[in-house]
Image (cartoon, rainbow, N blue to C red):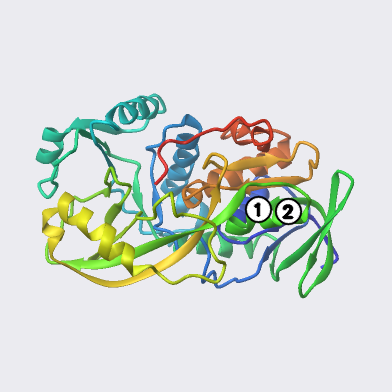
Amino acid sequence: MSGYDILIIGGAIVGSASAYFLRDQGFTGTIGVVERDPSFATSATTLSAASIRQQFSIAENIRLSRFTLNLFRELTDRFGADADIAFREKGYLILASEAGLPILKTNHAVQLAEGAEIVLEDAEALAKRFSWLSTEDIAGGAYGVSGEGWFDAHALLGLFRKALKSMKVDLITDTVTGIAREGDTITGVTLEQGGAVSAGLIINAAGPNGGKVAAMAGIDLPVEPRKRNVFVFEARDRFEDMPLMVDPSGIYVRPEGQVYITGGAEHPDTDGPADPRDFDPDWSLFEDVIWPVLATRVPAFEAIKPTRAWAGHYDYNTFDQNAVVGPHPQVKNFLFANGFSGHGLQQAAAVGKALAELVTFGGYRSVDCSAFAWERIPENRPFVELNVI
């Protein structure tokens, strides 16, 4: 383990997809992927709500997710006949009040222009489409007829990790404790167990720790961990036609087998950097905030039984809640794949492909990620995504 042409810091979905597509694009140099916990017990990938959507306000975000959607369609071609991530293509339903309707309409126009099959309906049409839905205080909603839904995050990550084992990629269980930099060039890293390891190029795919990893290289990256709670509950009624529904409050709910999962109650005024040791769900959010909203929006949810919950951390870009992708303009052998702010799982494959093209061919080919470049941060040019869930 003396050195690698490319060393990827973070072995969850973003790092694994980057390594996979580097090999897929024909990169023949040595690749190492450093992951401190290969069980991924507290990974943002495995603790997410594992969903994919095209309902964004920015065309580039829609393109990233559409790339991943196409990957889902060809899983067996890439990973074998038994490749299955249990994709449930049941759509998103994003509801808006009268005040939020203009933004919903503007976003819908962007989505249609990108080829997404999203319908925009008023409250009356939504009530006819979904008999279980109360449209009290709802002016309209956008519903993904196709290309949206949820899946098994563990299974998707497992497909990439399994593939890497036959692609001459070293999967290293260790923790990066330092990054060596000489002038404008990264020369290697220090591992807690493995010591000094040289590297020709670094990809920062460290998820919620992406900001800390960048700081080791003397680079400012406004990415920090944010805690998100997910609650599981049972209900007497089963609604087979229920998509992932997002209330105007930001609270979401969707079916998960025989139960339902819900979340989105964290208030922006009190939301802040997560304690790296805190993975305890905050049940008060469910009792005080979520349940009243669910009971209003879906009257059948007035009587439900909460069963369990979990909390995870995701990589939150405090600057504009959008990904940072590509090389640092001065430290060109340090590449970012960070700050996805809750939609990293659905965009990881596309970003991995984009970075692989950048390294192999010198430019983006499949999905142009230029708009996500780090330069926008010091230049104070926020690239704001309005549909953050």
* Label at residue 133: none
Q: Residue at x 63, y 51 (%)?
A: 18
- The quarter holding residue 367 reads top right
- Name the spot of residue 177 as percent of width and height, x first: 75, 66
Horizontal side of residue 304 vs 283, given as left or right: left
- Name the spot of residue 151 as percent of width and height, x first: 38, 56
Identify the element where label 1 is drawn. Answer: helix
Q: Nearer the viewer, residue 183 or 32?
A: 183
Horizontal side of residue 216 vs 13, given as left or right: right
Q: Nearer the viewer, residue 203 or 21?
A: 203
Q: Amino acid at mark 1?
A: Gly
Asked if labels 2 and 1 touch by Cβ distance under 8 angstroms, the answer is yes
How far apart, in angstroms, are the residues tagged by discs 1 and 2?
Answer: 6 Å
Q: Amino acid at mark 2?
A: Ala
Identify the residue position indicated by label 1 in the image: 211
Identify the residue position indicated by label 2 in the image: 215
Mark 1 burial class by Cα count in 10 Å: few <14, some 14-19, many 20+: many
Q: Is residue 256 at least partly visible in the picture? A: no
From what the image shows, is residue 187 above or below residue 370?
below
Q: Is residue 334 at least partly visible in the picture? A: yes
Q: Residue at x 47, y 46 (%)?
A: 71
Identify the element where label 2 is drawn. Answer: helix
- Name the spot of residue 257 as percent of width and height, x first: 26, 64
Horizontal side of residue 332 vs 279, given as left or right: right
- The quarter holding residue 184 reads top right
Q: Nearer the viewer, residue 266 or 257?
A: 266
- The residue at the far right in this view is 182
Q: Residue at x 43, y 49 (%)?
A: 268
- Name the spot of residue 230 as percent of width and height, x first: 36, 63
Q: Residue at x 78, y 57 (%)?
A: 30
Mark 2 burial class by Cα count in 10 Å: few <14, some 14-19, many 20+: some
